Amino acid sequence: MFNIVLFNPEIPQNTGNIVRTCAVTDTKLHLIKPLGFSIKDKYLKRAGLDYWDEATISVYENFEDFLDKNDVKNLYLLTTKGDKNYTDFKFEENDYFMFGAETKGLPDYIHQKYPSTRLRIPMIPKENARCLNLSNSVAVLLYEALRQHNFESMK
């Protein structure tokens, strides 16, 4: 099982879509507060459809709470500030993939703590092409990790 970590997600539809992706891939979802919405939000529920009961979701007060409650051996930051492509790594089961808030990304103190595992998803260099949509980025990365393991957990 892999782990998706959303740090201060802001848009309920993105998180709802990620819930659905996590449910169908047996991936645990970690949400780090503050959240930009209520987990009872109708848009969040609509985007996740009826997958909420199928997903494993944990909510944390802050980053320190997340670290205290999980045995994190490998934490990868997915960021436009990454200097390595996500395809350059061999992922292991139980790895954690952290994504920042849609408008702010991850804070500097997290970048400084994990400088060697900052990964990026390649994009064309255009001023208006800042980043991929959060739920799309999660799907791209997660399916690469699952592919590396021959989709074993899905057979």
Image (cartoon, rainbow, N blue to C red):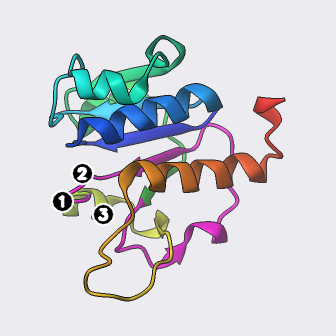
Q: Which mark is residue 104?
A: 1
Residue bounds of the magenta highlight: 78-105
The image quadrant of residue 68 is top left
In magenta segment, residue 128: no
What separation in Å lies between label 3 and label 2 (alpha carbons)?
14 Å
Helix or strand or loop: what does disc 2 sit on? loop
Tell me, for residue 101, which label it has, or none: 2
Q: Nearer the viewer, residue 105 or 114?
A: 105
Residues packed near mark 2 inside 10 Å, few (<14), some (14 to 19) or many (20 plus): some
Which residue in the protein does label 3 denote?
111
89 sits left or right of 15 in the view: right
* Residue 59 vs residue 53, the one in the foreground: 53
Indicate the position of residue 12 as horizontal and vertical percent values: 25, 35
The amino acid marked with disc number 1 is Lys
Crowding at label 1, few (<14), some or many (≥20) Cα neighbours within 10 Å? few
Left or right of residue 33: residue 153 = right
